[in-house]
Amino acid sequence: MLADSLLVIVWLLGQNIFASAQTTNATCDVAHNWAFNSKKQSPCEVASTLLAACTGSYEVYALPTDFHYEGPSMQDANPCQCNTVVYSLLAECGLCQDRTITMWSLWETNCASVSIGSFPMPIPAGLHVPGWAYLDVRTSDTFSEALAFANANITESTAVPQPSKTSSPSPSSTAVPTSSTSSAAAQPTVESDTSGSPPVNQTRSNAIGGGVVGGFFGLLLLVSAFSFWICRRRRIPKQNGEVLNSPVMSAYRTDTLPSQPTIPVPSITVSSLNSPPPSGSIYSSV
């Protein structure tokens, strides 16, 4: 455990040494301040820090007139130099000094392998690499300052935190609950939500349903009583022998017809409903 802790401390110290080992005397024109990272470091400083990740220190010298930064020699080529990120940073470092740049195909000539769009080594602690340094350079075979300027606000890349190798729980791991702990803590809430008492909406729905059913049966009972009263009312006159005019007879008006010979019409009574009609009658039995 102690040995692992010492290794982590040594690694962090080494990262800080690499970050402090960067050095450059190159100065960028103020018109290129957009190329600086959020820590106000120029692309020359950022490139020097990345290059120091492989050698322990690296100085990016200011360019004299008519000079530019070249790719690594065959004996000096290493992963920190053979990637498009450092190439883009040093290209912008030359342009911000009002100098020229070399093509990517010439830069990578002596590299056994290259990294495209990434830096193959861990980024030194505390360093912020501008996002525009990760843009494509192979399509045009050169760094495009116009494209970098258009993407000056891309998210920067920083060092990835290294997990602790100690077996004992760290303060951060005890402070943040794991997913299983969170599930256990949430369980009582779920159980309380599924208690025996019915939800309010369900109670209201049951009450409404019961009211509708009760009203329907009440209306049915009322209609039945009314029908019974009508039948009883019609049955009383029928038993007393009174005349029952049908709707057709009550709507039939004789005052609008021409005068006809008077033909005796027998009265339709309850008692005559069951007897055959007299001969010559124009009405049929009901």
Image (cartoon, rainbow, N blue to C red):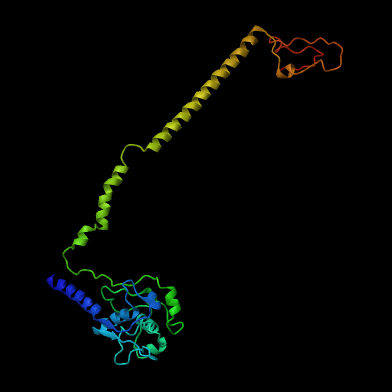
The image quadrant of residue 50 is bottom left
Question: Going by the picture, which residue comes out furthest to the left?
Answer: 2
Residue in the image at 64% along x and 10% along y: 237
Note whether 114 is above or below 249 in the view shown.
below
Question: Going by the picture, which residue comes out furthest to the top?
Answer: 240
Quadrant the C terminus occupies: top right
> Is residue 232 toward the left or the right of residue 118 in the image?
right
Quadrant the N terminus occupies: bottom left
Note whether 175 is above or below 41 in the view shown.
above
> Is residue 27 toward the left or the right of residue 273 in the image?
left
The image quadrant of residue 81 is bottom left
> Is residue 270 toward the left or the right of residue 82 in the image?
right
Residue 236 location (% of width, % of height) = 61, 10
Question: Going by the picture, which residue comes out furthest to the front?
Answer: 30
> Which residue occupies the foreground of this view, 260 or 270?
260
> Which residue occupies the foreground of this view, 116 or 187?
116
Residue 242 location (% of width, % of height) = 68, 8
